[in-house]
Image (cartoon, rainbow, N blue to C red):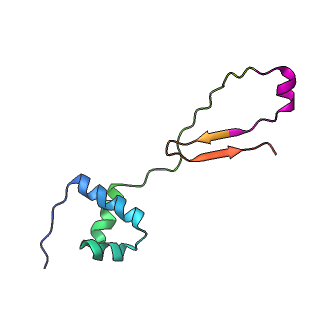
Amino acid sequence: MPKQVKRSSEQRLKLVVEFRRSGLTVHAFCKLHKIGTSTLLAWRREFPEQSAFVPVRIEPTSISLREEELASRASGARLIGSRGFVLEVSPR
């Protein structure tokens, strides 16, 4: 029987993150890293995935345009996430 290795919280988290990014099945990842499947499943419960939703704050900007320029422009929106994700909404 293989000797059990005591891993720190940081080591467990690193393996869980690596597993989530790997695209491997639990079985394949555990075999590769020589850990038990129930161990990895327990670590996943210990470190749940973060929500994909993040709080957003919308702030007005001051743009000085003449009234006729404002009337001729349609407005859109651009959101830039903290990880560089960009979402643009056009009025058309």
Q: Residue at x 54, y 43 (%)?
A: 81
Q: Is residue 81 visible?
A: yes
* Tally of marks: 0
Q: Position of residue 51 (x, y in %)?
A: 48, 50
Question: Does the magenta segment cover residue 74?
Answer: yes
The vertical placement of 30 against 69, above or below, is below
Closer to the camera in the image, 48 or 8: 8
Q: Quadrant of residue 27?
A: bottom left
Q: Quadrant of residue 90?
A: top right
Question: Does the magenta segment cover residue 49?
Answer: no
Q: Residue at x 36, y 58 (%)?
A: 17
Q: Position of residue 3 (x, y in %)?
A: 12, 72
Instruction: Please indicate whether residue 26 sits to the left or right of residue 60 in the image.
Output: left
Q: Quadrant of residue 70?
A: top right
Q: Is residue 44 visible?
A: no
Q: Residue at x 26, y 71 (%)?
A: 33
Q: Which residues are magenta?
A: 65-77
Closer to the camera in the image, 88 or 16: 88
Closer to the camera in the image, 57 or 73: 73
Q: Quadrant of the N terminus?
A: bottom left
The vertical placement of 30 against 83, above or below, is below
Q: Position of residue 53 (x, y in %)?
A: 53, 47
Instruction: Please indicate whether residue 72 sits to the left or right of residue 24 in the image.
Output: right
Q: Position of residue 58 (x, y in %)?
A: 62, 31
Q: Residue at x 70, y 38 (%)?
A: 77
Instruction: Please indicate whether residue 52 sits to the left or right of residue 32 in the image.
Output: right
Closer to the camera in the image, 71 or 46: 71
